[in-house]
Image (cartoon, grey):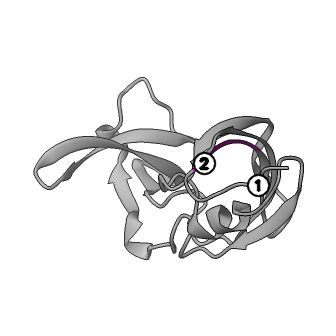
Amino acid sequence: MSTIKELDTIVLAYTGLLDNGEIFIDQPEGVTIPLGQNELPPTVENALIGMAPGETRTVKVAPEEGYGMRHKDLLQTISRSKLPPSITPKPGMILGLNVVKDGVNIQVPATVMAIEGEMVTVDYNHPLAGHNLTYKLRPLRIVSAV
């Protein structure tokens, strides 16, 4: 039976879990992933090398290799007037907010954390930042071998 090599393209079924057991992604039907393209954390890619389709493996990924550590400076309070009038913010809501980065106006996701009167506290950190992640891997097939 063939095993996965470094630059193969595979179909991978996987589930991602937080330390508390909450599932943050579930791909039971599998997705096509070209290895070596930084689409997966290095620990996950390395765990796949040598696996055969149908095998299972569980891999833990630290925050530094996943979505990074949380940064307090990415928690900001903005005026509700900076939001489109059609939006009624609620805690947990993810908004697309415009920010200027390197002189370019870009839209980035921000999670509404709190609302106090006309002020809205938003978090620009990725929702999975600061979390240890566990991936349950099951390659389904090798699409193209290198």
Secondary element type, mark 1:
loop
As helix, strand or loop, the secondary structure at mark 2 comes to loop
- CA distance for labels 2 and 1: 10 Å
x then y, percent, for residue 127: 58, 57
Q: Which residue is mark 1?
A: 3
Mark 2 or mark 1, which has the lower sequence index? Answer: 1
Across the whole image, how many numbered discs are drawn on residues?
Answer: 2
User: What residue span does the magenta drawing correspond to?
Assistant: 8-12
Image coords of residue 16 (percent x, y): 75, 55
Q: Main secondary structure of the magenta part?
A: strand
Name the residue located 72 percent from the left edge and 60 percent from the top edge.
48
> Is 90 a magenta residue?
no
Please, which residue is most extreme toward the top here?
A: 86
Q: Quadrant of residue 96?
A: top left
The residue lying at 83 percent from left, 66 percent from top is 58
Q: Look at mark 2 in the image and give the residue it sits on.
A: 8
Residue at image x 35%, y 37%? Answer: 83
The amino acid beneath tag 1 is: Thr
Q: Quadrant of residue 113?
A: bottom right
| Category of crowding for the residue at label 2, using alpha-carbon neighbours closer than 10 angstroms: few (below 14), some (14–19), many (at least 20) | some
Task: Write down the quadrant of residue 4 in the picture.
Answer: bottom right
Q: Position of residue 141 (x, y in %)?
A: 77, 40
Q: Which mark is residue 25?
A: none
